[in-house]
Image (tube, helix red, strand yellow):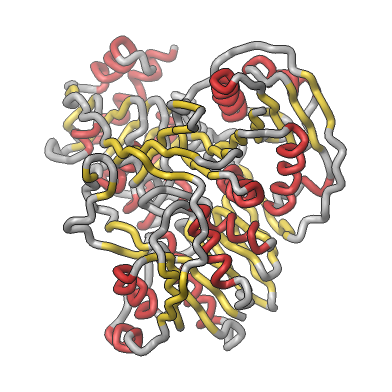
Amino acid sequence: MKILVCISVVPDTTTKVKFIDGKEFDKAGVQWIINPWDELALTRALELKEASAGKIEKITVVNVGAVEAEATIRKALAMGADEAIRINTTAKDTFSVAGEISEAIKDQGFDVIFSGIESSDFNGVGVGGMIAEILDIQSVSAVSGIDFADDVFKVKRDIDGGFEMLEVKAPFVATVQKGIAIDPRIPNMRGIMMAKKKPLNVVESANCEPLSEYVQYEMPKPKPPVKLVENAAELVNVLHNEAKML
Amino acid sequence: MILIYTQNWDGKFKKLSYELVSYGAAIAKQMNTEVVALSIGNVANNELQSLGKYGASKVVSVNDPNLSVVDNKIYAKTISEAVNKYNAKVILFANNNEGKAIAPRISAKFKAALITGVGKLPKSVEPFVICKKVYTGKASVDVKVNSDIKVLTLFQNSFGVVEAPVDAEIETLELTIDTPTIKVIEQSKSTGKVLLNDAEIVVSGGRGMKSGDNWAGIEQLAEILNGGTACSRPVSDEGWRPHGEHVGQTGKIIAPNVYFALGISGAIQHLGGVSNSKCIVAINTDKEAPIFEAADYGIIGDVHKILPELIEEVKKLKS
């Protein structure tokens, strides 16, 4: 069995975002990381492989990005992924990213494709579901747990108002969220050394056209200062009479 | 046509579907077209009719035993039949688990741009330009959509429910539905509890609550206010509360009317998840805590002392 984990490279979550003339994201001084959900997905994929007694043979990561993304992709290899694919183009919109990944991997026979439930930059949520539709395979979303036993995947998904445990047959796409793993795996020194020798294959873009474009960024308007009150009675009073929220 | 994917719970629609129809009706007005609401499952006629109150001139119902499991592939195929039949140009989903699961498949099927987490009406429909939050609420962007068909997911509680009554024509769609390929072996639904995404008022606790054993007050306040409960990341990481309650950059993004941040310092990642709230109330001992920069109202003080008083005051107000 082979697992693919889609990773996007995003600004560190503590980044104070800035834009150049409202037209493009200001990359100056930004630290780049693996999208937090993708990192958890990779962590769980590695755990599944280790517990599978050889049944899961290989974990591949794929990224759509320019050469600058390679340092972050190497981190995924250092965490334990066996190989990486970088599709050589910049990500334009969710649809084009899903199209690029589908085109690059369609003949590689992945059994499970992991994708984070969203990316912390554009907060697009669609890559996993779109890949599933393009490849015409099953997809399970909001996955907060996954196990592999007796050749069946047991998948926990959050539904609106609870959860379900599912049995899902490969191939499928799992769009994962927090809970699938709690903490991302931290690469150790050996992993970092080995990562340098692992394959990072660069494939050319299939030139998938985006369907949308970002025309103008805006920062939120500054908020008026907080109104401090002395006690609970006053708080309820202002929420009821002034804010009209209670 | 604007097609709305509604969701029902045991045959009943909730506010979320009424809000979706309201939002769809407003876009339909901009585009000079009408709203078709799609309902999947066993929903009584009078319940289907209720969607007309918010502007759905047609309600299409599909019911089949094979749809009792939400198999994303089959659901997407079912919805796509309706898209084709009614020549839908805009397809609306809620920005919740089910919406986010199915919308991308519809987007790929029709090569229709997917814009997730919208909250306001399009700035223009020709060309179609709509604003969405990016970087987890730290900024917003105007997106120009170039595809003929558009798929949008709406942040719950961002547009509101607006009455625009029309007579809804009910139609039953007979389709051949495939057998699901996923199997549900266990299902757990929390009954009676207000869902975090649905909640108009959210009471949330952070590390300042000191222990998971101190949550009774938070639950009680939420209950009196008919609200939901949430927490910050350290709280769910410590296992004090389930991960489903974690709001913030790597958790849920919510937009309630009132967000009570109790003992939450307000790290930038946390604020990203709650900054769309209409009113933020903070209680914290540390007057330098960043939560006070995001808050509308606040008390500097010990949450363990203030929360019981707050519960009593809210009780007085409600009685």
Relative to A64, residue B34 above or below: above
Rendered residue at 68%/21% (across/down) = B56
In the rendered image, residue B244, in percent from the top left (x then y), is placed at 48, 48
Relative to A10, residue B92 above or below: above
Rendered residue at 68%/52% (across/down) = B72
Relative to B39, residue A234 above or below: above
Figure quadrant of residue A85: bottom left
Q: Quadrant of the C terminus of chain B?
A: top left
Q: Total label count?
A: 0
Q: Is residue A59 left or right of residue B36?
A: left
Residue A120 in sight here: yes
In the rendered image, residue A84, in percent from the top left (x then y), is placed at 44, 77
Q: Is residue A2 left or right of residue B186?
A: left
In the rendered image, residue B83, in percent from the top left (x then y), is placed at 71, 38
Relative to A151, residue A29 above or below: above
Depth check, front residue: B138 or A49: B138
Rendered residue at 33%/18% (across/down) = B313
Q: Is residue A137 left or right of residue B68?
A: left
In the rendered image, residue A206, in percent from the top left (x then y), is placed at 52, 66
Depth check, front residue: A58 or B302: A58
Q: Is residue A135 left or right of residue A61?
A: right
Depth check, front residue: A40 or A10: A10
Depth check, front residue: B49 or A98: A98
Rendered residue at 41%/49% (across/down) = B251
Residue B231 in sight here: no
The residue lying furthest to the left in this view is: B288
Q: Quadrant of the N terminus of chain B?
A: top right
